[in-house]
């Protein structure tokens, strides 16, 4: 994989190389995740879903995405 113009992030504990200036919203769309069923944490801070299009990922960011699962 060519790493030029790429940054390294950690997504749920796994290293991932993505394009520079990728937003959190773009990452979620790329992963085909439903926004209404997940919570997103960037560098140990929970993100407000209203701002995902404005939040740009940086090299070495740590992202955790948790899925809500119903049950009873």
Image (cartoon, rainbow, N blue to C red):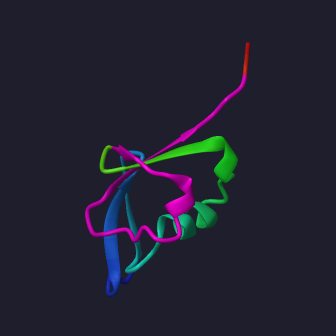
Q: Is residue 70 above or below residue 59?
A: above
Q: Is residue 3 above or below residue 45?
A: below
| Horizontal relation, residue 70 to residue 3: left or right | right
* Residue farthest left in this picture: 60
| Horizontal relation, residue 32 to residue 54: left or right | right
Residue located at (47% from left, 71% from top): 54
* Residue farthest top in this picture: 72
| Location of residue 71 in the rendering, given as x and y in whole percent from the top left corner | 73, 19
Tell whether position 54 is magenta.
Answer: yes
| Horizontal relation, residue 65 to residue 17: left or right | right
Magenta range is: 45-70
Query: Which quadrant would the N terminus be assigned to in this image?
Result: bottom left
| Location of residue 2 in the rendering, given as x and y in whole percent from the top left corner | 37, 84
In the image shown, does 34 or 18 lie closer to the viewer? 34
Residue located at (40% from left, 71% from top): 56
| Location of residue 32 in the rendering, given as x and y in whole percent from the top left corner | 67, 59
Residue located at (65% from left, 52% from top): 35
Tell whether position 72 is magenta.
Answer: no
| Location of residue 45 in the rendering, given as x and y in whole percent from the top left corner | 35, 46
Q: Is residue 26 above or below residue 68?
A: below
In the image shown, does 46 or 57 lie closer to the viewer? 46
| Horizontal relation, residue 64 to residue 36: left or right | left
Query: Which quadrant would the C terminus be assigned to in this image?
Result: top right
* Count of number-bearing discs: 0
């Amino acid at each position: 994989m060519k790493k030029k113009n790429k940054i390294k992030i950690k997504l749920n504990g796994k290293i991932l190389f993505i394009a520079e200036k990728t937003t959190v919203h773009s990452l979620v769309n790329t992963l085909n995740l439903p926004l209404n069923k997940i919570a997103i944490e960037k560098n140990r801070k929970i993100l407000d879903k209203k701002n995902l299009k404005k939040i740009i990922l940086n090299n070495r960011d740590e992202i955790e995405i948790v899925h809500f699962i119903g049950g009873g």
